[in-house]
Image (cartoon, helix red, strand yellow):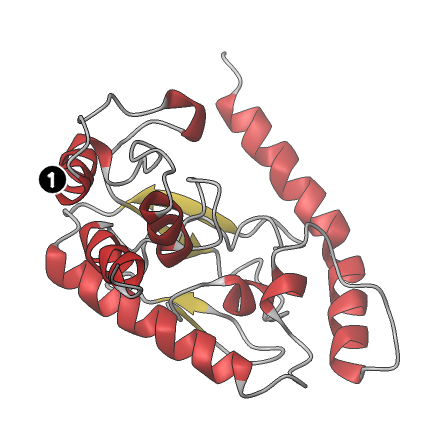
Amino acid sequence: MDENAPARLADRLDAALPQMQCRRCGYGACRPYAEAIAGGDAINKCPPGGTATVAALAAVTGRPALPLDPAHGLPGPLTVARVDEAWCIGCTLCIAACPVDAIVGAQKRMHAVLTALCTGCALCIPPCPVDCIDIIPAGRNWSAEDARLARERYDARRHRRDAEPGDPVTAEVATAAGPVPVDDDPERAFRQAAAAAAQNRARARRAARATTAAPC
């Protein structure tokens, strides 16, 4: 028996996934889902990939092409994140949450999304303490080249973070909803204070959105 066969199968499955790293399949990224499929998990849990990805996974595994499982969401057009610069407080939590390094900025400076790199995963939204990120239509399709480059950026980010265990802004912190508790780290203390100072503005923004959306 070939002991490397499961790993090679996982490689082929990973190559068939769209590499949006959105976690909607229930796994932390596309590669863990590929490994789970290689171990027997269902092939129909990737909403961004839709029926085309299910068909590709079916071809790799030799299994029937099942309908997409709606429990994991529905397919739709490509979207991207957009930061409202008027409300961004420069907390860097969205930067830490982005799995493909598609958000740029610095501490206490407005952040921006590189839309050509954004996968539309929406993982930057939960940690934002001031609700300044929207998901909007990308106006284009996601290509195989997009997937390849997104996987490269995801792998590079993961290796970089593995090499920097002391980084105060880890992915685990970034995906938590709400500001980080105050501690002895000055950067965390800044984020806490900035988020607290911005809460009234965030509530006003949400109220303005609700008013705009309300029927006349």
Residue 51: % across, % down? 18, 30
Instruction: Quickly name the residue at label 1.
Output: 59
Specify few, some or many for label 1: CA neighbours under 10 Å numbering under 14, 14-19, or 20 or more.
some
In which quarter of the view is residue 155 placed? bottom left
> Which residue is at 50% across, 23% downward?
213
> Which residue is at 53% across, 80% downward?
161
Residue 74: % across, % down? 33, 27
In which quarter of the view is residue 106 placed? bottom right
Can you say which quadrant of the picture contains the N terminus?
bottom left
> Which residue is at 29% across, 61% downward?
115
**199 vs 15, nearest the viewer:** 15
Indicate the amino acid at tag 1. Answer: Ala
The relative height of residue 165 versus residue 70 in the rendered view (above or below) is below
The relative height of residue 79 versus residue 96 in the rendered view (above or below) is above
The relative height of residue 199 versus residue 5 in the rendered view (above or below) is above
Judge from the rendering whether residue 84 lies leftward or rightward of residue 115; answer left or right: right
In the picture as drawn, the residue positioned furthest to the top comes out as 216
